[in-house]
């Protein structure tokens, strides 16, 4: 019986880069996760707890370090 190991999301020894925009820092890890683990990412996106958190990044509902909900973004 073989044990399936999890997929690697980054090369060995690779460092995560931080984007600095308007004095806020965001890790680009979520984009990396979406590319490498697409099926698992979509499953977590449908989750009731973590789905809304990932949706903020997915729909880019942030500006100048503040988060906006979908309802306030429509106004």
Image (cartoon, grey):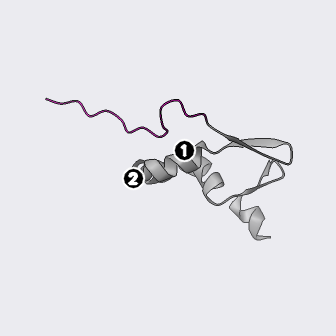
Mark 1 and 2 residues: CB-CB less than 8 Å, in contact?
no
Q: Is residue 61 above or below residue 13?
A: below
Q: How far apart are marks 1 and 2 (CA)?
A: 15 Å
Q: Which residue lies furthest to the bottom in this view?
A: 75
Q: Would residue 56 be visible to someone looking at this image?
A: yes
Quick one: quadrant of the C terminus? bottom right
- Magenta residues? 1-15
Task: Identify which residue, 51 or 42, lies in the foreground.
Answer: 42
**Residue 74 lies in what quarter of the image?**
bottom right
Task: Identify which residue, 6 or 55, lies in the foreground.
Answer: 6
Task: Identify which residue, 23 or 14, lies in the foreground.
Answer: 14
15 with respect to 26 (left or right)? left
Which residue in the structure is indicated by mark 1?
Answer: 50
Q: In this view, does 72 lie above or below 54?
A: below
Q: Label the magenta part by its dominant secondary structure.
A: loop
Q: Would residue 48 be visible to someone looking at this image?
A: no
1 or 2: tag closer to the N-terminus: 2
Give me the residue at 54% from left, 44% from top.
50
4 with respect to 34 (left or right)? left
Measured as percent of width and height from the top left, residue 3 is found at 23, 30
Task: Identify which residue, 21 or 45, lies in the foreground.
Answer: 21
Identify the element where label 2 is drawn: helix
Question: Crowding near pointer 1: few (<14 within 10 Å), some, many (20+)?
Answer: few
Quick one: quadrant of the N terminus? top left
Measured as percent of width and height from the top left, residue 15 is found at 60, 33
Give me the residue at 54% from left, 47% from top.
32
Q: Does the magenta stretch include residue 5?
A: yes
Which residue in the structure is indicated by mark 2?
Answer: 39
Identify the element where label 1 is drawn: loop
């Amino acid at each position: 019986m073989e044990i399936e190991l999890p997929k690697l999301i980054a090369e060995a020894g690779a460092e995560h880069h931080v984007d600095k925009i308007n004095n806020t820092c965001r890790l680009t890890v979520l984009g990396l996760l979406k590319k490498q683990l697409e099926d698992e990412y979509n499953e977590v996106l449908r989750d009731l707890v973590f789905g809304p958190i990932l949706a903020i990044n997915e729909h880019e509902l942030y500006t100048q370090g503040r988060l906006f909900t979908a309802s306030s973004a429509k106004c």
